[in-house]
């Protein structure tokens, strides 16, 4: 019995040590889970920056970190439906935008055809070939109030509200693209829809209004037709386009079939401009 007391004391100490160890183990586990979860969440909310910088660095001499800072200032810590296009003015100021006179290509409802064409023929420059346009092409982003994060999911869609970060960005840089347009300007419009010059398009609502006759000489419309072409250059919406042009800019319109464009893309040795 004399031994009983120290033995029981030992057992009690062992049980206590066991309890302490399990508590420590559980704590460590919780910490690991929290850290892993935290890392994934942070990475999830900051997916845009690496893509942004990676695409930006393909342009020589660009100050990509500075451009990123100016970019995210536009929408970070703001309601994602309260980002008007002027929020991107500081971004426009830091990202240089060299105009390529006579090579600027506007488009509306011909996205795939126009980019397939400009990719194969190095004659024209679209907005999506410029630094900001190519860096953000196809991406979605927004911020939220009370946070400095950039989110890439759960953001408002193009038509959910007018002043959403993505739409305002494209409106702002489209305005800039048109502001610097010069010489002969081309626009590829869609001949398979009833209204090739649609008042709600960025081309009609923003770009055309900003073409300035002090810099732009001609607007050449290429109306892309398919087998099922429903309209032609005599269409009333194109008459409206002509009326909206700054006085002094000459206008012309040409119907060009999609197959003719494809054919031209596959002969890059033909001189630019010989496609229509
Ligand atoms: C014109 O618009 C129609 C309908 O949206 C589309 O199917 C077609 O591919 C467009 N044409 C061109 C040349 O992009
Ligand atoms: C064209 O530029 C001139 C001079 O900068 C300006 O006064 C005029 O308002 C501009 N026109 C349009 C249509 O933007
Ligand atoms: C253009 O389309 C109109 C109908 O939308 C048609 O009357 C006219 O003949 C067409 N013009 C040409 C040159 O194909
Ligand atoms: C093209 O012009 C517009 C605006 O005048 C009309 O509303 C369209 O109906 C027209 N398109 C065709 C195919 O006639």
Image: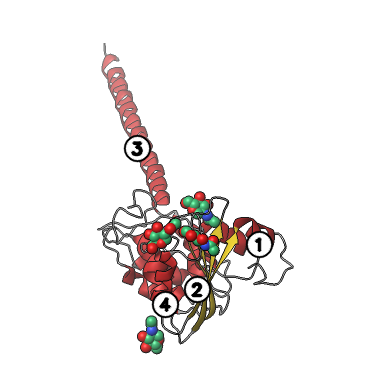
Name the colouring of the figure: secondary structure
- Numbered mark located on residue 63 in the image: 2
User: Which secondary structure, mark 2?
Assistant: loop
Q: Earlier in the sequence, mark 3 or mark 4?
A: 3
**Picture coordinates of residue 208, whole percent (x, y):** 42, 73
Q: Earlier in the sequence, mark 4 or mark 2?
A: 2
State which mark lies toward you, 4 or 2: 4
User: Which secondary structure, mark 1?
Assistant: helix
Q: Earlier in the sequence, mark 3 or mark 1?
A: 3
Q: Earlier in the sequence, mark 2 or mark 3?
A: 3
Q: Residue at x 33, y 54 (%)?
A: 159
**Picture coordinates of residue 236, whole percent (x, y):** 41, 65
- Numbered mark located on residue 30 in the image: 3
Question: Does 112 appear above or below 121?
Answer: above
Q: Earlier in the sequence, mark 1 or mark 4?
A: 1
Residue 173 visible to the viewer: no
Observer-nearest of 263 and 54: 263
Q: Which residue is mark 4?
A: 245
């Amino acid at each position: 019995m004399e031994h009983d007391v120290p033995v029981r004391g030992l057992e009690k100490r062992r049980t206590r040590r066991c309890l302490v160890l399990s508590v420590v183990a559980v704590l460590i586990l919780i910490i690991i889970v929290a850290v892993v979860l935290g890392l994934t969440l942070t990475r999830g909310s900051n997916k845009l920056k690496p893509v942004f910088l990676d695409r930006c660095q393909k342009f020589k001499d660009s100050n990509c970190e500075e451009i990123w800072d100016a970019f995210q200032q536009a929408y970070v810590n703001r309601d994602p439906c309260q980002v008007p296009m002027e929020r991107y003015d500081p971004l426009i100021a830091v990202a240089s935008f060299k105009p390529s006179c006579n090579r600027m290509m506007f488009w509306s409802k011909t996205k795939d055809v126009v980019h397939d064409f400009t990719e194969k023929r190095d004659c024209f420059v679209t907005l999506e070939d410029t630094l900001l346009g190519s860096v953000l092409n196809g991406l979605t982003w927004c911020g939220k109030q009370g946070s400095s994060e950039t989110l890439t999911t759960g953001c408002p869609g193009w038509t959910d509200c007018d002043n959403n970060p993505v739409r305002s960005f494209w409106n702002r840089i489209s305005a800039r693209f048109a502001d610097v347009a010069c010489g002969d300007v081309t626009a590829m419009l869609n001949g398979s829809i009833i209204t090739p010059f649609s008042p709600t398009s960025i081309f009609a609502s923003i770009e055309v209004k900003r073409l300035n006759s002090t810099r732009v000489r001609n607007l050449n419309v290429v109306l892309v037709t398919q087998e099922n072409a429903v309209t032609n250059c005599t269409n009333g919406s194109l008459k409206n386009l002509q009326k909206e042009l700054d006085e002094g800019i000459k206008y012309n319109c040409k119907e060009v079939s999609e197959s003719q464009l494809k054919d031209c893309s596959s002969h890059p040795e033909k001189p630019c401009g010989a496609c229509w």
